[in-house]
Amino acid sequence: MRFNRKATFLAAALAFAAAVPFAISTTSAQATPSRQGPSPFCLLPGSSNGPGGAPQICGYYSYQECLQAAADMNANCVANIDFPGQIVRTPNGWRAQY
């Protein structure tokens, strides 16, 4: 039996291309928040234009999650001005009340 590199490579590439959309759809479905409406916390990244020079990145429903993302992205965690509820201080940080 003769080994054909091109056919083997083509079969592997097709299998990978067929599997990628399923992997992307499962990870993006897990990353989407389960809550509806505006989130209480946003990231405020810095920019070369100074504070507030870049748009806010909203979508954080937990203050701890926002703080972790802010640490990873070198940004600040701020309250979302479009959030209709209240954000209250607790002994463990901030909490949103809907």
Image: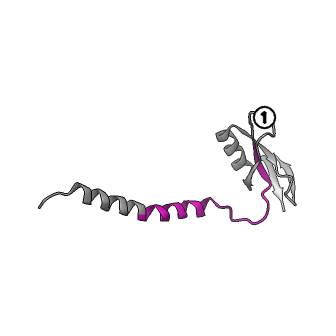
Residue 58 drawn at (x, y percent): 75, 53
Numbered disc 1: secondary structure: loop
Residue 36, above or below 47? below
Magenta segment includes 3: no
In which quarter of the view is residue 45 placed? top right
Residue 43, above or below 37? above
85 sits to left or right of 45: right
Q: How is the image coloured?
A: one colour
Which residue is tagged 1?
49
User: Magenta region: which residues?
Assistant: 18-44
Residue 82 drawn at (x, y percent): 85, 56
Residue 14 drawn at (x, y percent): 36, 62
Residue drawn at (66%, 40%), measured in percent from left and top?
73
- Picture quarter with the C terminus: bottom right
Residue 14 versus residue 32: which sits nearer the camera? 14
In which quarter of the view is residue 27 placed? bottom right
Q: Residue furthest left?
A: 1
Magenta segment includes 37: yes
Residue 90 versus residue 63: which sits nearer the camera? 63
Residue 70 drawn at (x, y percent): 70, 42
Residue drawn at (20%, 57%), measured in percent from left and top?
4
Residue drawn at (67%, 44%), measured in percent from left and top?
68
